[in-house]
């Protein structure tokens, strides 16, 4: 019996640690994968197309949008980002749980389309810590970091629409929390489907005599 994988949305302000947490999960938890989004944002140094993102021109993004290739999309920090539909649906149907590192606008679209999606919000211990992480990551320019910080409180205000909240202070505790959520969600009876009990053979009649001998 193959159960559908779990669709796990991970949101939170830029620099809070979403990629760090998601990468840890896909490396250490079997049957999980990270969805690779398409974006019009230019690659940062070291980013490769098809790995962190699929980097596309604005015109190509528009064509993909018209062709209904995205399960959700949004404009974030001035660029378009979208989750490709086909690989996600195939993975879920083959029993693989898929993590989506997407913003709160995208999470809202997923929640409206997939009743079974699990929404996890990652919050920083404080805005000062968030600022430090963005500066020490040193991947974005000063103007871009300011833009991301300005939006942080707005993003955090949406955490009440999520199912779970992880405060990413200590990294090992935060990864444990995300792993626990995924493992528990996989065990929901409603996900296992109606046939698992019949298939299990646990309903077969057994006499008391057989049990005691
Ligand atoms: P996001 O994907 O949310 O933008 P990243 O995963 O890129 O954030 O993390 C931003 C920076 O913070 C990275 O340099 C990462 O190594 C660091 N980081 C993530 N989680 C923690 C943590 N719990 N403690 C300290 N640093 C962290
Ligand atoms: P970054 O440019 O730092 O990689 O990502 C910026 C923001 O875009 C992050 O909050 C990230 O979660 C979000 N994001 C990345 N991919 C997608 C996507 O496919 N859809 C949506 N809605 N947001 C995305």
Image (cartoon, rainbow, N blue to C red):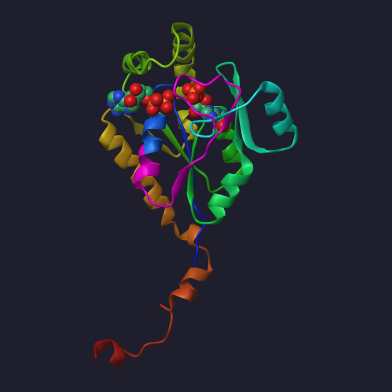
Where 171 falls versus 213 (above or below)? above
Q: Is residue 173 at all visible to an observer of this figure?
A: yes
- Count of picture labels: 0
Q: Is residue 103 at all visible to an observer of this figure?
A: no
Between 24 and 131, the one lying in front of the other is: 24
Where residue 157 appears, as percent x and y from the top left, is 47, 23
Between 82 and 52, the one lying in front of the other is: 52
Name the residue located 42 percent from the left edge and 51 percent from the top edge: 185
Name the residue located 26 percent from the left edge and 30 percent from the top edge: 170
- Residue 71, quarter of the rendered image: top right
Tell me where the magenta segment starts and ends, as one range: 24-49
Judged left or right of residue 90, residue 123 is left
Name the residue located 50 percent from the left edge and 63 percent from the top edge: 2
Where residue 81 appears, as percent x and y from the top left, is 59, 27
Where residue 3 appears, as percent x and y from the top left, is 50, 60
Where residue 168 appears, as percent x and y from the top left, is 32, 29
Name the residue located 28 percent from the left edge and 32 percent from the top edge: 171
Between 183 and 25, the one lying in front of the other is: 25
The majority secondary structure of the magenta stretch comes to: loop
Question: Does 30 appear in magenta?
Answer: yes
């Amino acid at each position: 019996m193959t159960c559908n994988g779990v669709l796990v949305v991970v949101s939170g302000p830029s620099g809070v640690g979403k990629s760090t947490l998601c990468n840890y999960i896909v490396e250490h938890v079997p049957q999980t994968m990270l969805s690779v989004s398409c974006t019009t944002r230019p690659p940062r140094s070291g980013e490769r197309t098809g790995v962190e993102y699929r980097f596309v021109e604005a015109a190509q993004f528009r064509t993909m949008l018209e062709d209904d290739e995205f399960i959700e999309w949004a404009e974030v920090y001035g660029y378009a980002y979208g989750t490709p539909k086909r690989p996600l649906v195939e993975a879920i149907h083959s029993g693989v749980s898929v993590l989506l590192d997407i913003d709160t606008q995208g999470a809202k679209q997923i929640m409206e389309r997939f009743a079974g999606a699990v929404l996890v919000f990652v919050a920083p211990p404080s805005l000062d810590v968030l600022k430090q992480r963005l500066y020490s990551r040193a991947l974005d320019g000063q103007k871009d970091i300011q833009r991301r910080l300005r939006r942080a409180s707005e993003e955090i205000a949406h955490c009440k629409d999520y199912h779970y909240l992880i405060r990413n202070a200590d990294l090992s505790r935060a990864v444990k929390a995300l792993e626990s959520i995924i493992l528990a969600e996989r065990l929901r009876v409603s996900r296992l489907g109606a046939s698992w009990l019949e298939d299990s053979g646990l309903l077969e009649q057994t006499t008391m005599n057989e049990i005691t001998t």
